[in-house]
Image (spheres, helix red, strand yellow):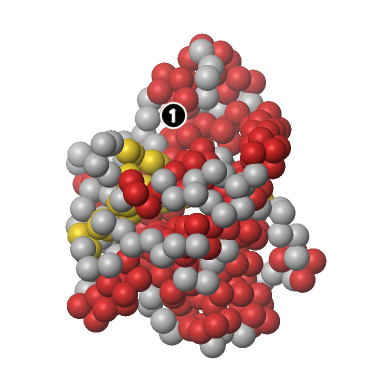
Amino acid sequence: MRVRMSIIRNIVFCSERFGVNPKEFWQKLQLSPAEYEQSDSMVDWRLGAVVWDVAQELSGNPMIGLLCGELSSEMALGLVGHLMQSSPNLETAINNLAKFNLAFSEMFYYRVHADLHEFKIELAPTEMYWLHYPESARHSVEISMSGILHVAQMLSGRKIAPLYTTFSYAGSNDKLATYQRILGKDLRFNQPTCSLVLKWADVKLPVIGYNAELLKLFEQLAKEYIERHQQGSTNVVAMIRKVIMDNFQQQAPSLSEVAKKLGMAERSLQRKLQVEGFTFQQIIEELRSEMAIGLVKRKQFTANEIAYMLGYTDPGAFRRAFKRWTGVNPGEMARG
């Protein structure tokens, strides 16, 4: 998984408003000017996750994500930002954000669910992101929430307030006032998904910079960018790993499910794996070990909880597998 460097730059420069020294931030991320000035480049997703840990550490502010969203610009999204700016209305702009999400991030998705009464924007970090960096994933959700509202106001010239907002995690009383100031009074925690729910009257508002010709141009450029990226990914193991990580929900998707998502026949996918010297089960095992090690080192879950999260019905089987992967049991690694 990868994320656009401009997203990271946006977080660093927004954090400056909360007392963070950008030079110190870049040093913490171990990035040179030559690297962070490449705003169009795509970098490993772990850098996109760690950036929030550093932002919270340097600012001392547990609400840094939500607050940075109020300063964010659609231009951090590159082509997709231009596409949103050229859209006829907010509905189209937000749908374009979801449709061309992969042009700026592979670690976070926007999904639109609309009916006669509500326009819902689901904000979804990948399962791998949630598992390894839960606090960072929370910040990503919250900058997206406040960022969408801020960008909607810039695009339409009108302040937008959600009908209600849902979170897949618990809230806390000391943060409630900040949530309510930015996201409104109707906050629903411990829900199945994180989402912003908007009024149809708001999403139908026209975008001030609407330009039909530019809309067509940027849409074509965004399509071509994603197609080039997908075609350039010739490593079938990397593609399979990405599909598994994006769809890992207590258990890994099957080979047939992965093949379907890649638009390939199951036998064809198996042949390609053989050429690269891998088996599907070997990839599953490697990913499980990576997730298990990351979760144990975070010390937020018991071994039994991690076993359940990774699809083990028998915690003992998970402990034996962990010892095989690492040479130590989960408790020893957590204490070390």
- Judged from the image, the secondary structure of the residue bearing numbered disc 1 is helix
Q: Is residue 177 left or right of residue 33?
A: left
Q: Pointer 1: residues within 10 angstroms few (<14), some, or many (20+)?
A: few
Q: Hey, what amino acid is under mark 1? A: Gln
Q: Is residue 326 visible?
A: no
Q: Is residue 34 left or right of residue 164?
A: right
Which part of the image, by quadrant, shows the C terminus? Answer: bottom left
Q: Tell me what residue is drawn at x 47 percent, y 80 percent.
A: 57
Q: Nearer the viewer, residue 146 or 160?
A: 160
Q: Tell me what residue is drawn at x 49 percent, y 49 percent.
A: 206
Q: Is residue 18 visible?
A: yes
- Residue 179: x %, y % from top left: 30, 72
Above/below status of 245 relative to 141:
above
Q: Tell me what residue is drawn at x 26 percent, y 78 percent.
A: 177
Q: Nearer the viewer, residue 306 or 219?
A: 219
Q: Nearer the viewer, residue 103 or 71?
A: 71
When asked about the image quadrant of residue 29, the answer is bottom right
- Residue 69: x %, y % from top left: 47, 67
Q: Nearer the viewer, residue 275 or 247?
A: 247
The residue pinned by badge 1 equals: 281
- Residue 42: x %, y % from top left: 66, 51
Above/below status of 120 relative to 185:
above
- Residue 172: x %, y % from top left: 22, 74
When asked about the image quadrant of residue 234, the answer is top right
Q: Tell me what residue is drawn at x 22 percent, y 68 percent.
A: 185
The mark total stands at 1
Above/below status of 101 relative to 81:
above
* Residue furthest right as drawn: 34
